[in-house]
Amino acid sequence: MYVLLVGINHRTAPVEIREKLAFTGGAINQAYEYLRQKENLEGAVILHTCNRTEVYATARDIQLGMEALSQFMDGFSQFTREEMKQYLYQPNCYDAILNLFRVASGLDSMILGESQILGQVKEAYQMAREEKASDGVLNTLFQQAINVGKRVRSETDIDRHPISVSSVAVELARSQLGSLQGKSVVVVGAGEMSELTTRYLMEYGLSSVIVSNRSYAKAEAMAQLFSGQAVRFDQLPAQLGQADIVISCTAANHYVLNSQNCGDILKARQGRRIIIIDIAVPRDVDPVLAKIDGVQIYDIDKLQHVIDVNYLERKKASRQAEKIIQEELDKFNEKLASLYVVPVISALKEKAEIIKNQELKRAFNRVDLSEHEKKVVSTLANNIINQLLHHPMVSLKEMACSNQGHLYAEVSKKLFDLSVDMEEMNVGEVEIGQPWQQVGSVAGRVR
């Protein structure tokens, strides 16, 4: 059995290419219908986010399986195979499994360590189950990937250091003001960054949101999102008298907040702290206002410094995460490898039993033996078979956990002329809570 992967992501393809593989609306259902009908695929799971589209699949023949996936991409990408070729990645089995573990852990995300991807992996797996597209190997693989993602986040600090401008802005406000429960914010500008930062702030219990923008209609629209109040731009300075936090991000080419329009209002606060976070470029807030008692201004450069420090912390955590992933990958692959030899051992024992019974029957037909004598001969035959097969079977089990496990299984099949039904690899019933073992990869084969 082979684990296959074909995909594109933010590193291999620009957004204008990625959007051509967007499974919106009923497209995902059509995609699964197509994949289910492919005779050369045993199972499939589609992982689709704004930054990646990946199809994980299993097949008994790697060439036929990859051709089936290529045909799938041809049919759903709106590009020819030749046009898509430069953007696609098709790793071998070992790297396909490694890729999924890294994706679920947030190590392959545009924002290192982001947690949203783990939920997206869960949703992708659940969708495949609902569509009856996933098989036993993929069920086990995705359940383990989800567990790996959880373990990385619980044992490292990979997602505990904010590295987006919006999240860092909120963390700064919290570090300076403590609890944000009952605090008020004035938002200057109604763009995407302002909205995102306000959403983060609202998670911490703000009591009021005031939005001001040159377009009053846009201010009203954004204020409604947060059950807040919109004010006209000429009324903005007056709102600073009671605010605890100011978030400013406009497209103005001059200082929106300066000494002339809000200096006196800020002085009238008599030192009561106000945190002004200026994430605009060019800056919205005149830095001279920071000389007023109680006024703290954080511009984009100060935020970037925090982001840089936090990113280094995440990179440090990512090294821990890589070790965890490798541990789990080895355990997972080892388990698949051991399962690979189970049907071979069963077939060997069954064949030995058949040969023993045939030869005993032939012998008993030639020689007149008492029941006691037959029992003695049968016991002798059993002992010979057991001793003869004991070492090969024990060795095969031990070798299954090596990087060449599947090769030993194949050699055993040839040596003993065994006919093995690999459907006996019932990995779908494996409990994720059990200890795992290792896999390597030769041309993509699970081993």
Image (cartoon, rainbow, N blue to C red):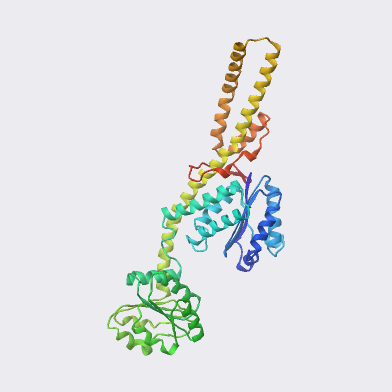
* Residue 238 drawn above or below residue 305: below
Q: Position of residue 161 (x, y in %)?
A: 41, 63
Quadrant housing residue 308: bottom left
Q: Position of residue 176 (x, y in %)?
A: 33, 71
Who is closer to the viewer here, 430 or 72?
430
Who is closer to the viewer here, 314 or 75?
75
Please say whether residue 215 is visible from this viewpoint: no
Please say whether residue 191 is visible from this viewpoint: yes
* Residue 114 drawn above or below residue 289: above
Image quarter where the N terminus lies is: top right
Image quarter where the C terminus lies is: top right
* Residue 420 drawn above or below residue 117: above
The residue under the point 38% across, 89% down is 261
Q: Position of residue 50 (x, y in %)?
A: 57, 65
The residue under the point 66% across, 25% down is 354
Q: Position of residue 286 (x, y in %)?
A: 39, 83
Q: Residue furthest front?
A: 371
How many numbered discs sit on the rendered protein?
0
